[in-house]
Image (spheres, rainbow, N blue to C red):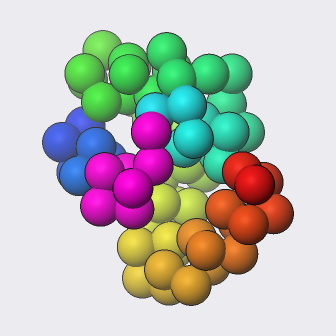
Amino acid sequence: MTPEEFKRLRQSWGLSQNDIADLLGVADGRTVRRWEAGTREQPGPVVVLMRILEQHPWLLRDLKEGLLE
């Protein structure tokens, strides 16, 4: 997944960098900023989860309700 694609997906879901970090279980938004800048590669499991969420957006809603609210 390219950094641009990652950022586009995150933004299309209306999530901040900190929100997606919480959802993915990473330290904080700095990690996401590095992924989106291309200075750090996204781990394989993160890419898989992003692809699943892209194909099944209803899962994102359930995750957001459970983790972010």
Residue 47 visible in the picture: yes
**In the image, residue 54 lies in the stretch drawn in magenta:** no
- Percent coordinates x, y for residue 55 in the rendering: 42, 82
- Percent coordinates x, y for residue 36 in the rendering: 30, 30
Q: Is residue 34 left or right of residue 47?
A: left
| Closer-to-camera residue (50/65) | 65
- Percent coordinates x, y for residue 69 in the rendering: 75, 55
Q: Is residue 2 left or right of residue 32?
A: left
Q: Residue at x 58, y 70 (%)?
A: 60
Q: Residue at x 30, y 15 (%)?
A: 39
Number of numbered discs overlaid on the protein picture: 0
State whether residue 60 is above or below residue 13. below
Q: Residue at x 52, y 23 (%)?
A: 29
Q: Residue at x 67, y 31 (%)?
A: 26
State whether residue 33 is above or below residue 16. above
State whether residue 22 is above or below residue 61. above
**Magenta segment, which residues?**
9-16
Q: Residue furthest front?
A: 69
**In the image, residue 10 lies in the stretch drawn in magenta:** yes
- Percent coordinates x, y for residue 41 in the rendering: 39, 28
